[in-house]
Amino acid sequence: MRAIIFAHNIAASPILTHILPMKTDAAPKPTRLEDYTPFNFDLSESRFDFRLDPRQTTVRSLLSLTRTAPGPLVLDGENIDLVSVEIDGRLLKRTAYRVTQTQLILDDVPDQFALNITTRCDPSANTTLMGLYVSGGRFCTQCEAEGFRRITYYPDRPDVMSEFTVLIDADKAAYPTLLANGNMIEAGDIDGGRHYAIWHDPFPKPCYLFALVAGEFDRLDDSFITMNGRTIPLEIYVDPGDAPKAAYAMDSLKRSMAWDERAFGREYDLDRFMIVAVRDFNFGAMENKGLNIFNSSLLLADAQTATDLNFERIESVVAHEYFHNWTGNRITCRDWFQLCLKEGFTVFRDQEFSADQRGAAVQRIKDVRALRARQFAEDNGPLAHPVRPTEYLKIDNFYTATIYEKGAELIRMLKTWLGDATFRKGCDIYFDRLDGTAATVEQFIACFEAASGEDMHPFMQWYHQAGTPRLTVERHQTPTSPVISQVVSFSQMTPPTPGQADKAPLMIPIRWQAIGDDGPLMDPQLTVMTTDTQTVSYPRFDVPHSLSIMQGFSAPAILRSDATTEDLIRLMGQDPDAFNRWEAGQTLARRLLVDCARALESGTMPEPDPALGAFFGALGKTLRDDSFDDAFKALVLTQPTGMEVLMAAAPIDPIAVSEAGDWLARAVADGLRNDLLQTYAAMKDSGPFSPDAASAGRRALKGRCLSLLAARFDPLAASLAAQQLDDATNMTDEIGALITLSRLGGQRVESSMESFFEKWKDQPLVLDKYYSVQAMRHHADGIHAIIRLAETPTYERSNPNRVRALVGGFAMGNVRLFHRLDGSGYRFFADQVLDMDGRNPSVAARLLGAFEIWRKLDAKRQQLIRDQLDRIIATRPSKNVLEIAQRMRGA
């Protein structure tokens, strides 16, 4: 017998037809931080009854409301049909409320009452993948940031927190598994071949953390014993047959739970923890309380179908979403302007976890590479915005590298400045003081003020100000009595960004150290810069030395120093800070790449650079040094990204930048050929596959050696790649060989691509890899090959993963075709953005971000991209796409 949550029978409610206003040409109005006001009702309890049907799902809600301020009750709602509205069991007439395109407004309500709303929606037609939708025959939800309003009318804002009780009623044969947040309190069968489950979440939460899943799944089970002895069942739900591929995710989850207890003292709180994998998902994953929903690409992995990068990302994202239980769920954000509060802190936490699991130096290098490639470009382009923005049209567009990665760097600076013990004390105060609340950045920072006694107000400038500061460092000697001391001077400047012409000085913690030919000459220093300029003296050394500045990348800044080639080679060989040892090589490589790109752009070949020989020598010394792990060596051999060169040399021809990268890779391979061959041979796996850090490091170094050998078009590289493809027992080796062959060209490429496709065409996640590799190839017939790929039967235009693989892979990874001077690459890309916008505006807007570099390019390409942006704006696209296009264009 089905348990009844609501006394009223849904079927008895008359269907009320409401004619909603059509969209108009009026410019959309932005939401502004300065306009924030609290919701004028307290919502203590929310109960929902879902009668699931793919085409007509009925949702009945019962909300317990108490007035806290004057005004009407305004609820959010989009693309849903209103059936009825009741107050305290009394059915309201149509004249008692107003319905607009986006709201249900009740002007006259009691100060305390029960509101009962019945709505209907069509999940099968919901291609936006926001709210309640159908994926692969299963029901799924995604409610962050504003998806819940597509399910029912509700105050869809993060500061309205309520206990949720959810009843799900569905056909048992089609949907045998019924899941929602919290703890299951009852389940059973009902007439008509249906069944039900009731879930209760005792922790008040905003509706963006609501989750519901229904369908047929396989389940992987395990458990975790908390630090207080509670046994927590762990459940991962996947497509039938995929349970073995969830084993690594389960292992990552258990390690994450144990680490959070050790590092932050945070214990899991509910009676069970669940994860569900779905293919159609806009994001990587979602931290819904107790019921995380993951994109399958970030949950499923085995040796045959997943690369080491996939395993690494699964480990990181599983940790990230689990850590959100405290930094995002138990304490959430007051409004969406505070998004960095939960995301920046949680990214920092998952980075610290990954550093513990995979090595601090290697992880720091990877994090900074990602920051420079994505966030620095964002900070120095038309989409620049503060870590805490002040306005938006669509909050979906602010799930950015600035919010996430730069937000994490701000947390790291706090730890660097305050020290480990005080930082942990501040975190403990935060968890104790703000548990169960929707908080602000100011409240977060106040916890560290309480822990340290420091005035944290100057640090807040990082949250208010967009842009990446330039930190200039110069050395000079100053006579003093009776000795000569040496002085290092620091100066900072942040360039103007859209809407912020004038910049204030930032608080910048700078770790630095003097390094001689035999190693450090002094202990590491910490200088906390608070003004435009600052000088610091240090002892005189009577031996040649160099300064290692910004050790561990102590602040998200661009360093400009007077370091010579001799200084950089010394640091590459002697710096005890592994990050800065790597960074010295990157700095020298960037200089070489910029000079080469400038020469190529002018139509000349780069002159022989005497720094090249010393550079090769330092790389070779590291490659042969057994004291470094293989993952670090692989990163040392990886040159700076094209984006870093674009930022340093802009405006410039992007193809010249790409060709400069090819030139440097060939030069390194020529100089280190024997070392690369010997290392490649030594890195071959001799045992069963393992995704652990050491094994992944070996494969990364092997892959990097092969890639460099291919850069010089070494005949042996083609033979090695072909043999590796034939012998591969794991996807890392297989896809690495395929990519190498695709770069070398020749007859073997097409046959290898066809074989790969035939082998993996029934594995969606591997097929995504196939489209990505194809998208980045330099096809002989140019853009027409990419167009044909978009027309193949296995290309799924509505699946975000597939679209990102082809369209995103093309825009971000195929420099020569995307940036063709005839503009065909830009036109194709804009066409795909508009096509996706008709189905999924959120994904379309994220794709459009590939155009953000347009001001870094040469004048001809700038005009070509401006034309496409104007074309997109003229089509009257969604608010998501319109906001990005207008901000890029400068409109």
Image (cartoon, rainbow, N blue to C red):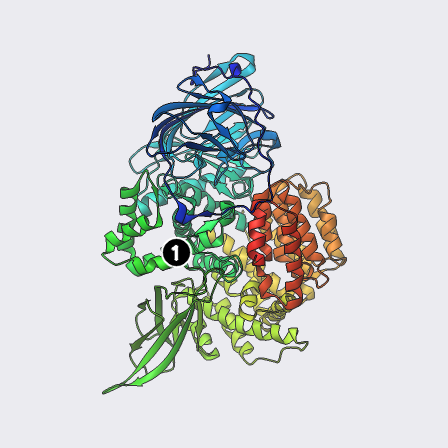
The answer to whether residue 292 shows anywhere in this view is yes
Q: Residue at x 52, y 14 (%)?
A: 12
Q: Is residue 774 left or right of residue 842?
A: right
Frontmost residue, 19 versus 887: 19
Where in the figure is residue 801, as x and y percent of width and height? 60, 44
Mark 1 burial class by Cα count in 10 Å: few <14, some 14-19, many 20+: many
Give the residue pinned by disc 1.
463
Give amino acid for label 1: Tyr
Residue at position x 52%, y 48% in the image: 397
Observer able to see residue 719:
no
* Horizontal relation, residue 543 to residue 642: left or right: left
Viewer-side residue, 37 vs 690: 37
- Residue at x-position 39% and y-position 44%: 36
Q: Residue at x 64, y 55 (%)?
A: 870
* Residue 266: quarter of image: top left
Q: Position of residue 334 (x, y in %)?
A: 37, 43
Q: Could you tell me residue 240's position as x and y percent?
A: 57, 30
Residue 393 locus on image (x, y percent): 51, 47
The vertical placement of 255 against 506, above or below, is: above
- Above or below, 381 against 276 in this view is below
> Can you say which quadrant of the picture contains the C terminus?
bottom right
Whether residue 837 sits left or right of residue 289 in the image: it is right
Is disc 1 placed on a helix, strand or loop? helix
Task: Classify residue 324 by image quadrant.
Answer: top left
